[in-house]
Amino acid sequence: MDKIVINGAKPLNGTVEISGAKNAALPILMGTILTADNCVIENVPEILDVDLTLEILEKMGAKVRRDHTTVEIDTSDILPCRSPYELVSRMRGSTYLIGAELGRFKKAKVGMTGGCNFGIRPIDQHVKGFKALGAEVATLGGFVEAKAERLVGTEVYFDIVSVGATVNVILASVFAEGTTVLENVAREPHIVDLANFLNACGANIIGAGTDTIKIKGVEKLHGCTYAIIPDMIEAGTFMFAAAAAGGEVKINNVIPKHLDSISAKLSEMGVYVEELDDAIIVKREGDMKSINVKTRPYPGFPTDMQPQMTALLCFAKGDSKVTEAVWENRFRYVEELRKTGANIDIAGDTAIIHGGTELVGAPMRSVDLRAGAAMVIMGLAANGRTEIVDIHTIERGYDNIVKKFRSLGADIRKVSF
Ligand code: EPU
């Protein structure tokens, strides 16, 4: 097993390259199923969730060739209902197999999926969309099964804004007869990226990035070459780490617009943020101010930056509030952060951070992906030694995180034990 060991309280300086977005890569790689052809996907992050996705697709019959961040994938021989339960159950993103298999084969059978544990993770909105298109859907013996004689375009109004339901119903409706109109959809950049990829393969999807998406059914898709957008959450994590530890970091290969809510909060805290065309500079020298934050679907402040924000605010003077409005239970990491002396109270959906006290590195267990990122930020900025275990949770979504922080001058390493 591996752990991350950090000797903290050293400023970060230099330049870091951001990888492709995990939450765009997963739906796009699953979306290649619809093409029944050869696709070349570039800027794919080298993370465990991508390894798992490619393994699942190979087990279903895809031919995969991977050269670092470029993945060539031929899905012509894929068969439906063949994804191994023990693999799909490890990752939430495998839910997208339901939409992709249903779209291409009019039938799907996929094991109930895992992923980070933030309380109940229902798929009622996915099911609502599949049923509206004409599918029968059942959940039996740990599997979701869906089948349809025909998929017919329709209107779907989602009761809540869901990234997963938006992705899944787009995938299922690419070949549906007529026009499908999806309302109250997620507007995340990864939704736009999926639609751009599918359109590059011959789909007819408009409106991605707004709250209404229209899909005109097409008969067939073809392969294409497509580059995934940069990961806004990885970028945000480096921005917060630079603010917490101090120093000056240039974060390359980003789309600054995607980072607006994150940059705005840093500026409010008194951290210097400069936007360039495809880079962001974060510089922190003096004290940081306390602030209040509430998570929201895009373009609001992302829930996937919430744990990192709590860690950062431990270093800002005064009381801050972080309210979680997307997930029911995403504060499990707080108990771990408290080991450093962090003074954080939880009141319902809100963490109250009494910041600016002296914090000392501590042993911590990464309870999920972004929780682990918060612990890395804490370790980089707190005095003394931090050791983080269960780091596979971090490596699910961060590409070479240790190497990237080392290149910024951090005293951080991965140690086997
Ligand atoms: N929800 C329902 N019914 C549904 C679907 C969702 O009630 O049918 C609820 C959820 O319980 C939650 C809210 O809607 O309270 C939002 O869930 P959403 O469906 O948007 O989340 P997801 O698709 O399961 C993706 C990301 C998460 C990220 C969320 C929110 C992937 C693979 N995962 O999850 O990313 O937190 O959107 O932005 O894209 C991460 O990267 O660390 C991560 C957890």
Image: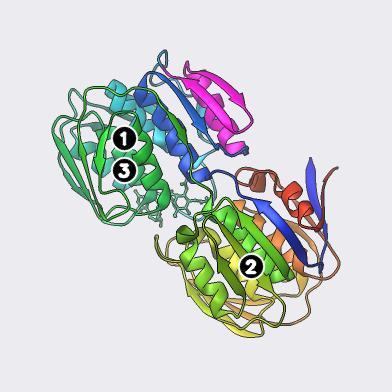
Q: Residues within 10 Å of mark 1 (few under 14, many from 20)?
A: some
The amino acid type of the residue labelled 2 equals Val
Q: Position of residue 166 (x, y in %)?
A: 32, 46
Figure check: 411 above or below 334:
above
Identify which residue is drawn at 74% across, 69% down.
245
Mark 1 — residue? 199
The residue to which callout 3 is attached is 126
Please say whether residue 253 is visible from this viewpoint: yes
| Contact check, label 3 and label 2, Cβ < 8 Å | no
- For the N terminus, the image quarter is top right
> Which region is colored magenta?
48-75
Q: Quadrant of the C terminus?
A: top right
Kindly identify which residue carries mark 2: 282
Q: Which of the two marks, 1 or 3, is nearer to us in this view?
A: 1
The amino acid sitting under disc 1 is Asn
Along the polypeptide, which appears first: circle 3 or circle 2? 3
**At 59% across and 64% down in the image, what residue appears?**
307
Q: Earlier in the sequence, mark 1 or mark 2?
A: 1
